Amino acid sequence: MLKIGIDLGGHTISAAAAETDGGALRFVSRAERATPSSRSIGDVVGCLAGVVRELAGGQTVQAVGVGIPGFVDLKRKKIIRLTNFHSLENIEFASLLEKGLASSGIHAPVLLENDANCAAIGEGACGAAYGCRDYVVFTLGTGIGSGIVANGRLLSGAHGMAGEAGHMTLTSGRVRCGCGAIGHVEQAASADWLEKDARMAGLPGDFKILWCRRKEPTVAAFIEPALDALSRCIASASVLVDPEVVILSGGMSRAEGLADDLFRRAELYLPVPFRRYFTLKVSQLGSDAALWGALSLPEGECK
């Protein structure tokens, strides 16, 4: 039987099917789709069901794990709010997807998890945090997410929403974030917000281009505050968790020199006793980190 993991991104849906081989998961197929431009519930569910059907190829599916870029409830069945999607809140998403799959003849349980938490699970099981019991993973992309593992356990909190470092209030911004509040790191440093602000200023709305031109004064006006907000966020999380390692994941993390820049900046914000232990790494799994985590959700299995 197959397990299927899905990473639902703001721009891209990545999915993989894996089978158990001697207790370890092994990728057997994968697929990628553009996230429906409407980002509506019907279109998203339809797209995900189609991807699962394609990957299943007529085989029995044991379970489907989905990484969600937003807040999910404690039971991991309901979407509370997706900050970069429209009207996707307080929805029994797992049930809707299960029904969508059933209409295609696939009867499998669906378990949701925050996508950054999925990345943290994946990195701990077979990535840059392998063997660690205390670490933080930041996902830098459409939004800013984070997953925290403390004493070997994923931190979920009383209501299932712990670890949302991207929504730490570390800036003076007054524009309302997709979560409904103001002053969040996500507004200052995520790719979506940076690209939106750049376009409004007549600059290229592409983070890769902006990063390459970051030393130009007009571009630096956007990039410098973003780097400062991110470094403050990393330092703050480090003080709270005292991690063995902090890992950067997501599309932005692969920008050349970004990790080194953030290390230097974050170190200045850390209390001196923390600095000797501060370690910042880029994900070893890249975009596969959240997939490994999503595949591991049903039974916590990833080797």
Image (cartoon, rainbow, N blue to C red):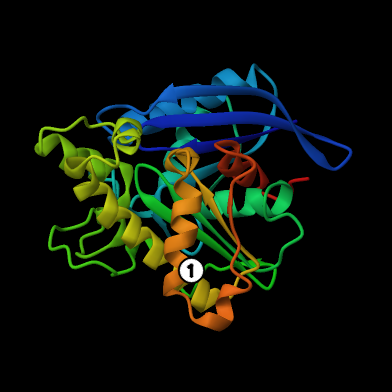
Say if residue 14 shows up in the picture.
yes
Which residue of the protein is positioned furthest toward the right in this rendering? 22
Count of numbered labels shown in the rendering: 1
- Mark 1 = which residue? 267
The answer to whether 241 is drawn above or below residue 185 in the figure is below
Question: In which quarter of the view is residue 21 placed?
Answer: top right
Locate the C terminus and report the quarter of the image it occupies.
top right
Say if residue 164 shows up in the picture.
no
Along the viewing direction, whichever of 69 and 47 lies nearer the viewer: 69
Residue 179 in the image, given as x and y percentages of width and height: 26, 58
Residue 86 in the image, given as x and y percentages of width and height: 23, 43
**Left or right of 189, for residue 297:** right
Question: In which quarter of the view is residue 145 placed?
Answer: bottom left
Which residue of the protein is positioned furthest toward the left in this rendering? 201
**Left or right of 98, for residue 207:** left
Q: For the point 34% across and 55% down, which residue is it?
A: 227
Locate the N terminus and report the quarter of the image it occupies.
top right
Mark 1 residue element: helix
Identity, as a three-letter code, of the amino acid under mark 1: Glu
Residue 138 in the image, given as x and y percentages of width and height: 48, 55
The answer to whether 123 is drawn above or below residue 244 in the figure is above
Q: For the point 28% across and 70% down, which residue is it?
A: 169
Q: For the point 47% across and 44% down, which residue is it?
A: 257
The answer to whether 254 is drawn above or below residue 234 in the figure is above
The answer to whether 176 is drawn above or below residue 41 in the figure is below
Residue 32 in the image, given as x and y percentages of width and height: 50, 23
Along the viewing direction, whichever of 247 and 278 lies nearer the viewer: 278
Question: In which quarter of the view is residue 201 placed?
Answer: top left
Near mark 1 (Cα within 10 A), the count class, few <14, some 14-19 or many ≥20, is some
**Left or right of 51, for residue 295:** right
